[in-house]
Every structure is written in C-alpha cells, then in structure tokens.
Image (cartoon, coloured by chain):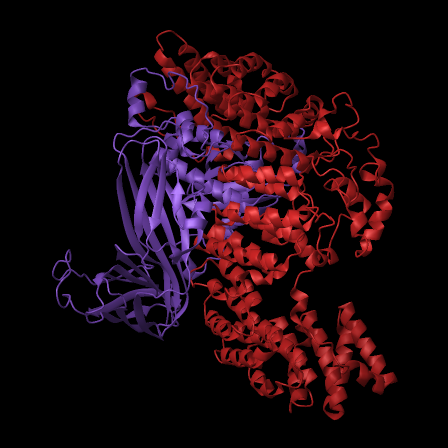
Amino acid sequence: MTRIDGIIILDTNGKPIITSNFPSHPPSYSAIHIDAFNHALKLRPDSGAGAALPGGYAGVEPVIWVNTLSRTAGESVGMGVGMGGAGLCHLEREGLRFLVPISHEVNPLFAFSFLESFLETLQDYLGEITEATLKDNFAIVYMLIEEMLDEGHPMTMETNMLKEIVLPPTLMRKILNAAGVSGLQAPTTAPFTAPIPWRRPGVRHSNNEIYFDIEETLDAIMDRRGVVLSSQLWGRINCNSRLSGNPDLLLSFTNGKLMENCSFHPCIRYSKWEKDGVLSFIPPDGRFRLLEYQVAGSSQVPISLRPRVKVEDYGGKFSLTLASRSSRPLEDITVTICLGAGATSVSATATGDKRPLGVAPAGLAPGGRKDEAAALGNILRWTISSLLSTERPPTLTGSWTSTEREPVPDPAFNLGFALQHQAFSSLRVDQLRVRGDVQYKPFKGVRVVGRGGRVEVRW
Amino acid sequence: MADAKLFTRGKVQELRDELRQSGDRRDKGFLRKKTALKKIVANMTMGNDSASARSFLPRPASEHGMQAMAWPDPDLVGLSPLFGDVVQCMAIQVLEIKKMVYLYLVNYGRSRPEEVTAAISGFLSDCNDRNPLIRGLAIRTMSSVPLPAIIHSLTDPLRHALQDSDPYVRKTAAIAVAKLYASDYGKRTVEKEGFVALLRDLLADHNPTVVANAVASLVEISDRSTDISLRLNATVAGKLVAALGECSEWGQIYILDSLLSFVPQSHMDAEQLAERISVRLQHANSAVVLTTIKVVLYLMNYMEDESLIRMLERKMGPPLVTLLSSGSEVQYVGLRNILLIIQRRPAVLQNEVKVFFCKYNDPIYIKLAKLEIMYRLTREENVSEVLAELKEYASEVDVDFVRKAVRSIGRLAIKIASASDQCITTLLNLMQTKISYVVQEAIVVIKDIFRRYPNQYESIIGTLCENLDVLDEPEAKAAMIWIVGQYADRIENSDELLEDFCFTFKEEPAEVQLALLTATVKLFIRRPTAGAELLPKVLKLATEEAENPDLRDRGFMYWRLLSNNPAAARDIVLAEKPVISTETDRMDKGMLDQLLLHTGTLGSIYHKNPNTFIRTARARYLPDSPALNASSKRHLISASGFAASSFNRSPVPSGSSTVPNAVGIGSGIPPAVPSRPAGSLAAPGAEPISPISNAANDDPYGQLADLDFGGGVGAGTGGGYETDMPRPRGADEDLLF
C-alpha cells in the first residue's frame, strides 16, 4: 500500500500551523504525532559539539516510531482497525518542521520524496517558506495539500499542472481580485492530465531561452598528512527552460563518459543515452534538475590544509597552512572548526601574500584578498577570497582559551571552496540542438561551477 | 467558562453573518464570499485540537486590502455549526470557492452525518459538470466522506467517472475506489458494484497516470482485503512495465510496487522483467530507485543465471551509494536498507567500504548505521584501512559512537582471523588513552578475542590488569573477572585480584556476582592452595547471603560438584569451550529474504517484519513457484500455520500455472453477492492453492501447514471457510488486452 497519512507543519515552537485532514484516523491522530515528535525532540542527546553544528537537531532519527494505540481508536468511522503504530518521517526547513506520519507499510523515502516536492511547490507559490507566509496563505496551502494528496496518494504533483488548478498568490491576482474579476473565468476544457506528465501543453514564452547549470560537489575526508581517505565527486545539472511549444532537445558533451551512475529526470530518453551518450529530452517548463551523476574513481582535492593543533589546559594552539593544488584560482575558501563548548576567545595572525604574485588574473583587484579570521561563538572561521597555487601558502597561527580544563575541539576542520567556470571533472557541454515543433532559435546558456561540499581535514 | 462558550458561539455567528451577507448582488465575483470562506478555512486548523489553538495569539487583523484575513482565533474551536451555510455555497460556479467548500466538507462531513445529505444534490450536479476538474473534485470529495448516504449516491457517478473521457477524472476515480474500500459500507459497495473489474479495465488505459493509479488502487484493495488479491501474470506485468517510462515518479512507484504481485513461473520471466526495470535504477527519485531495488531483489529469488545475478548486483551498488549524497533523512533510510541488502547479497557493495567512512559532523544515527555497514564490508583486503578509521572514531566525543567503534574493532578480530593481531594492537593502543569507557569497552571485546583465539594473546593480560581501577561497568567487570578466572594459573596474583573484587560482592549486580563465583571456582581448580581461602567465602556469600536464585543455584551446584567429585568438577568447569564466531550476528537467510520484500519500507528501517509493529501490515512471504531457485528455496519461510493462512496474503498459484494469460484478481467476492461475477476475477482454472504445498519439502513447518491446508487444495482458501468461492470464469472473458 503506497500512501502516506497526511502532512503536519509545526512552527519553531513545535505547535501546529497546518494539519491536513486524516480521514481514516481518529481525530486525535495528528495530536498524537505532534506530541510524540516534540517528546523525541526533547529527549535528543544534546552533545556540546552537535548543537553547534549545521543540521540542527541532529539527534532525532528521521523516522521515529509512534505508538498510536489510543482508546479512541475504535470510534473512528468503522475503520479504526488499523491503529497500533505508525512511523513518523520528519524534516526541518527554516526552523519549521514538516511531519509525515505513515501508518502503512510504506517506503519512508516515498514520504521524504513527497515532502521534497511539496516544499518545492510551496517555495514556488510563496517565495519563501516561513511561518508568516504560511499563515498569510492558509487557504492556498490547504488547497495545495488537497490537490497534491488524495488521502495520502500523491495526486497532481507537477507544479505546471498545479498552477492551473490552484492559482498562485501573485500581485496580478490581487489586482484582479480587487477589480472583482474572478479567478477562473473560462473553464478550461483541456484535459488536466497532459500526455507528457511533466509538461503542460501550449507553453508560450516571448523570449525563448534555456540555461544549464553544471555544479559539481566534492566530498572528502583527509587525514592530517593530507592523504585523501575517501572522496566522492557528485555532479548535477540544473536546468531552467523557458521554451515555447514542445521542443525536443539533444544535449551532447565533449566528455560525457565521465558521468557515471547517473540518475535522470523522467524526461530523459534512457536508451538514447545508453546508445550514443547524449541526452535527448522534452524538458519540463521552468526550473528542474535534469540529472545527477557521480564521477568515478577517487578525485584529486584541489586544495590542501595542513593543520597542527595542540590542546592544552584551558585552551590550545593551532597553526594552519593552506595550499592550492589547482592550476586555476580557488575562491571563497573557508576553514571552520568548533573549538569546543567552553571556548571563549581566539587570537590569531594570518600571513601570506596580500597581493598575488605575478600577473593578477583579470577580475582580481590588487590586494584582492581578504584574510579574515573570526571566532563566532565557539567556531573558528578563516575565510580567504581567493587562492592561487603560485603564491606563498597562507597560514593562520594562533591560540584559543577555554573555560574547560580539557577543551574538546572537533576532531576535524571543515573546508569550503569554489572553482568558478570549471568543473572538477572537466565535463563540458558540446552542443545543444533544438528540434520538435519549434520555429525559433532559443538563447542557450551554460554555467559551470565546482564546489567543496563536505570536505573535512582531521588533525 | 460560560463566557468563553458564548464568545465562541459569537465568533461562529460572526462568520456566519459574513457568509450570509456576502450573498447579495453587489458582491462582484463573489469576492466577499471568498474572503469569508478563507477565514473559515484558516480557522479549520484550530478545530482539530484546542492545544494548537493556543499557539495563535490574537493579532490585530492585518489590512491588506481585500485579502485581509482574520487570524485564527483561539476561541473558535468548532466550525461545524456553519455546515448548512457552507453547503449553500456549493451552487456558486467559481472554482476557488468550490474548492474551499469541498475542503470544509471533507473536514466536517464526517461529524455531521445528518446534514451531509443536503450536500448530495450539489455533489451530483458537480459530478456532471462539463469542467473535468470539477467532476474530479466532486468524486474526490465524496469518496473522502465515508458515510453510507454519500457512498450510496456516489455509486453511479463513480462508475461513470471510471470511464470518463478525461484522464484527470479517471485517475481520481481510480483512487476513489480504494478510498471507498477502506470503510465497511464502501467495501461492500465496491464488491457489489464490481468496481474492481472496472479498475482492472483501467490497467489497459492509454494514459500512464491512470494505469498507475488503477494499479495502486488494486494493490491497496488487495492489501486490505482478506479475499481479493492482486496477481499479475507475465503479460500484464510486461505491459505495466511498458507504461513505466511515461509515468511520473509517483506512478512509477505504484507500478513497481505492484510487480511484487507477479510470481515468475520461469527463470526467464524473472530475468527479463528484472532487466527491463533495472533502467529505473537511474531515476532521480530515491524512492523509485529503492523500490526498483526491492523488485529486482525479489525477482533474483527466481533467477538461475548466475552471471545475470552478478550483473544485477553490480548495477545495484552505485545507485545505493548515490543515496548518500542526499539529505540526512534519505541517507538514513538508505543506510538501513543497505545494511539489510548486503547481508543477503554481499557482492552488491563489496568494494565500496570507503564510501561509508563517517564524517565527524554526520548525525549520530547516520554514524551508527555507517559503522555497522563498515563492519559488514570489511574483508582481509581492506581491514587495515578500516581499522585506522575505527581508531580515529574512538577519539571522538560521542560516547555511544566511541563504544560501538571499539566494539567493532573487536568484532573484526573475531571475523577476520588474519587481522586479529592488528586489532589487538589497535585495542591496546586505545587502552593507553585511559578514557574509562574506551578501556572498559576494549576489555569486553578482548575477552571475546581470547575465547576465539585461545592461547594466542595471553601475553597482554598484564596490560589489562593495569586497568582494573577504571572498571565500573558490570559488563566490563564481568569480562575482566572472566579473564582472571580463565587464566588464573598464568596471572601471578590472580587470587589477590579476585579477592579484591570480592570485597564488594554483595553490592555487585548479578552479572558480576555470577562471574565472580565461576572465576573463584576456576581459581580453586587451577591453583587449589591459592583459592582454598577464597572459595568457601564466595560459596557462602552466594548460597547464604545472596537473594538472586540463579546465583544461589549455581553456588550449590559448584559446592556439591566440588565436594562429591573434584575430578569431574575439573572436567566440567575447565571444559573446552565452543569457539565463538560472528556468524551469530547474521540474520537468518529466510528472514532476510522476507525482510527484503519490504525493502525501503518501515520494516527495513527497524529490521523487523512490519506485522510485528503495524497492525494493518501483513507479513509478506516469498511465494513459491517452479522458478524459485535452490538457494532461496532452502531458506523459504512461508505462511505456515492455520491462523496465518486465513489472515495473510491470499495464496499464490503454485506449480502448474494453468492459465498464463490472465490477471488473477483474487479469489473473489464474498458469497453473498453471486449475482455480479464481475468482482471475482479469479484466474480461470487457477484455483487458489496453498503456497506451502511446494515448499514443504525443505521446511519442517511446511508439513504442518500442509496438514492445515490439506483440504484447501482445489477447494478454496482458508481451510474451507469460504466454500462457495469464485467460480472461475471462462478464460476468454478474462483476457485483458
């Protein structure tokens, strides 16, 4: 049985803002789940280091077990038979918590996938998802839930289709409303389930354009000597398509073989990829993720950090040396570490070339580097705007003090960086051909960026 | 109290007035009506529970022109008194208003069964609206109000909707049937009206979304029903797979899920299907990927071609790894499933252990799940890397994680004989940290290593004994005492050590007391003079002063044994111990096969059969078929036992599939309604036969089941409970496509 029970949205204090209807469950069903969730949240192991980390409430397992056996179970209209227990999937977004109870033998990923699409849709409708926007648009959120979930079965999930059924709260509409024009004037008679499920028929744009964003993220664990223990390179191609009609696209790469283990948007014709290594598809309208891939083999990490940390009583000393291993400039480099719960102050000096050696690459103003070491709370953060492999490796040396006798800093540094205009894997788009029932020449754009995702360096 | 009530009524009254006043001609585009309804919708959340209402402090009404919306009022609890007024709005032909009215009806319809009839005429006219959206909306709303009156009037519109010209209406109607089936009255209606047959017809629809919803609905009905069960044959399964390509991800999940109702009758069936769906492993949606893996794993049980199985296993690895690039929620579900999958199919990720190395800022639940997988994936070739990694973890702050890491080192020593030296060195290194819980955890695992490799590592006993002071956990203490007792003759001062432990004998938990008792006896046997003084003391403590009956019994036993026949006591106490291995922590293969049928579902998260923690869930059993391969057959767990049979999934065809070309939907309808055989879509000629009959050979319980079912073969399910079961219809009538 592939269905979820419904959806509950809690505010930052754990109070419900939106509760969908749970028709086949007793009225107390949602309250039981909310209580169970808040209880689990309270019980979470609040370890000093964990609390300061991104990812918020790290302690609670994403699927918790809720005992829904209650005395009222039998009262629900002839279908209380199913009581006994349920799984509760939850995730956090902007401090709000989204809960999806599942009382059947369902894939929790099904629930999380649904939540993800739901959140995307909300974002699309409301701009940003906050307590205030949700409350301002109660009716719309409810109608969306109603349209997306038919007693737990995902119904209309494509944003394109939804927009024809539930009108987004645009400024335009407010004006129309004020003028007394009703929402749906001429009932569309076109079928609402289009032949291509991801594309609404009759799309029109005055400017036909399509953009591809190739983004690669590098995850790695390095030890104190700079040896890469484990690394994975993930890539994704996001697309923003604003093309009229039903364009049939053919995207080819100069070195598409690099992409392994792809996961495709349903629009991609798989057989074509298998045979010719090209992406052939009719795109959805608007923003969507075209594909995700992995680059096989362990990847080079284009930056190295040599950390030396010495923990002493009530504090410690550290010395960090950064070096670039890439021929291209690295940007937005950040080094962060949590120095432990009791850390009170940090003093550090940065050395290195304030001015890049040799010829400054275009776009980089003289002295265009800013070393900035700041301790926010108990987190040490060192940021450098850009780094070249030719310059003297910048260092940061300093010490910190702590109220604890034996401070416990995190066992690893987090390293962030970006590589503009180039992917780690040197993947490149060769060409994009547009066919199908289109008479126009679209504007095409490709942007490539490589980013350090979760790179940690142990000391 | 009374005031509050009045106030509430006042609020409802206010809303009602607003709704009524807005009904005049000046309300262009029903704008005011819309605003009033929006207020009602906004207030609906509060109706659910009064606790939630408190979170909304009264705020001054915002003044955004016409959009101004009243804030949910804490005093407004029930909106059901407005029922009549809201129902009147149904006549307004504005989609937005209709949607809000329906939203209200879904929420309050159930609580106002007397008044809901007033809405029926409105519903019926909407079911005939020329806008398919409104037709669908009406069907959807009606099926969400499970009251007999509504269901009764829904019957005809629903039948039309299932054959509507617009796919939106058809797909809505398909789900509506499953919704009806959830209530008792609806269930009877569905069976009486032959809706199941109409759903089956929708499987041949040209719109893939409709096909997917129809199949989802059928799966749900067969899951709920005791006597209807979905059964697909190779042809239909093939057609469903063909529709996969054009479905949305949700449709794909529905269809893939339904494929578990297909029991391959030949190796070819399974192999072809698995190859066709393995394309879905490349899907962007993680739920699709995991569902595909579930189906492929299921089909593997029916394959024979080893090279194909290897190939599929290799294909499965990368998508599983990809799950780790997602958010921690998806990672967690993925990891729990990986753990299950690699136990049955170790080849899937055998070279990928590095992927599971923990980052220090992974949430703890992810770290623990990864640790377990790392342990499973460690082999001789990669054990050094893993050990280095585990040692790293042992210095982290999270106590639970550190303990598990240390324990994993010990388990690796036991699992991989050639690595035991390395493991011991690592453990001794860790003990030098003198961190209490690290030391204690290490001692616990070292005890097991001693047992696994007798006479190899006794030289380190001295090092262990240096750490006696830090021991404060019963498990570690008991382990240390065991070591002292076991090697009493090699530890010079073993008698003193045990004596020290005995000072606190009475305060210790039973676990430690038992260990002390046994260790003292060993000491006495190995070094009679050294133990002569201590033994009587301990025996006296155990037999006269202890309250724990186990301890007393054991004390008496030793006492008698030693006093009657010391030679026998020596043989018994110092007997060769069976070698321990890590095989014990591996799950039974049959159980694994069964759990893997639940891949990606709750059962795979908790590693338990879902029927043990969700009452609605049923245990799934791997259906037997001539194609079931030998290794799966050996471990087959079937629905044995009488009780299980009548409540579990309807039987699957065994052996000779007489009719390969039919969708068998179940063993049919209840006896009460023989007039409409449409509901009984039993596969022609394929009488439900107990799945057990074939399995019986290898399974000791199978024999039992056979007895229970003896009469069932050819005579219907459930040991003759439902004797006048479906008459199989002619094969030609059942052809689907």
For residue B477, what is the image quadrant? bottom right
Q: Which chain is represented by red in the image?
A: B
- In the rendered structure, the answer to whether residue B398 lies left or right of residue A129 reads right
Q: Is residue A38 visible?
A: no
Q: Nearer the viewer, residue B64 or B223?
A: B223
- In the rendered structure, the answer to whether residue A453 lies left or right of residue B287 reads left
Kindly identify the residue that appears in the image at 63 percent across and 78 percent down.
B449
Q: Is residue A164 visible?
A: yes
- Farthest residue in the top direction? B25
Pinpoint residue A14: horizontal percent, then vertical percent.
46, 42
For residue B492, what is the image quadrant? bottom right
Q: Nearer the viewer, residue A448 or B587?
A: A448
Pinpoint residue B171: horizontal percent, then vertical percent.
54, 28
Q: Nearer the viewer, residue A401 or B639?
A: B639
Q: Is residue B531 above or below residue B311?
A: below
- In the rendered structure, the answer to whether residue B681 lies left or right of residue B22 reads right
Pinpoint residue A395: horizontal percent, then vertical percent.
24, 71
Kindly identify the residue that appears in the image at 46 percent across and 45 percent down.
A270
Where's the C terminus of chain B, which quadrant? top right
- In the rendered structure, the answer to whether residue A391 lies left or right of residue B282 reads left
Q: Which chain is represented by purple in the image?
A: A
Q: Is residue B314 above or below residue A315?
A: above
Q: Is residue A369 above or below residue B31?
A: below
Pinpoint residue B190: horizontal percent, then vertical percent.
67, 25
For residue A342, what is the image quadrant? bottom left
Kindly identify the residue that appears in the image at 79 percent across and 37 percent down.
B687
- Farthest residue in the front direction? A275
